[in-house]
Image: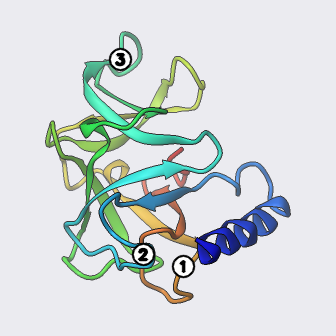
Amino acid sequence: AARKAAEVARIRRIMANRSNHERTFFRGLHFYTAYGTQILQGRSIKMYHWNTKTALHSHWNRYNTGSRQQEVTGFWQRDNNDWFQLQTLNGQQIVNGSTVRFRHNLTNNYIYISEGHRSPTTRQDEASCRRYNGSDQRFHFRVEIMSSWAGDNHLRVGDAVRFVNLGNNRTLH
């Protein structure tokens, strides 16, 4: 508990000196695994958004406007709609700079960033889930580890991380 509190304090100090855009990141959570455990290719995880205190979440519901695709939201309660599988394109370990995609466990669809469609609540680019098309870069995200739990290059439970979309260079948030 002391180590976790010290890490949270350290991240808060780092984030206090960053712009609002730079403060947007997820903290990978896997509720049955200890902090510091390496997140492996194909592992299902839940992710927690630092600023909004919500989990990355999707379900069968579709947006009523915009792309009309499967909704991806931040949700303050926890349920089975929060599980996503991280996949690398080459089956390698997930490290800083890796390219990943997110498969929603219950629907088997992948997170996609829609250009030209705005979220009805945040007015940012809409994140949705849809069938995977490997040639479209809007399914792919670059891993940027902001603060490492273990101090190394591998993505681990508890790391502060941003996911930057390769199709439009925008951060998933």
The picture places residue 51, in percent across and down from the top left corner, at: 65, 45
Query: Badges 2 and 1: C-beta atoms under 8 Å apart?
Result: yes
Quadrant placement of the N terminus? bottom right
Q: Mark 3 = which residue?
A: 63
Find residue 20 and name its label: none
Q: Mark 2 = which residue?
A: 156
Q: Mark 1 = which residue?
A: 149
Quadrant placement of the C terminus? top right
> Which kind of residue does numbered mark 1 sit on?
Trp
- Which residue sits at x=31%, y=33%? 58
State the scheme by which the image is colored: rainbow
Q: Earlier in the sequence, mark 1 or mark 3?
A: 3
The picture places residue 37, in percent across and down from the top left corner, at: 37, 78
User: Between marks 1 and 3, how big is the CA–CA gap?
Assistant: 36 Å
Q: Secondary structure at mark 1?
A: loop
- Pointer 1: residues within 10 angstroms few (<14), some, or many (20+)? many
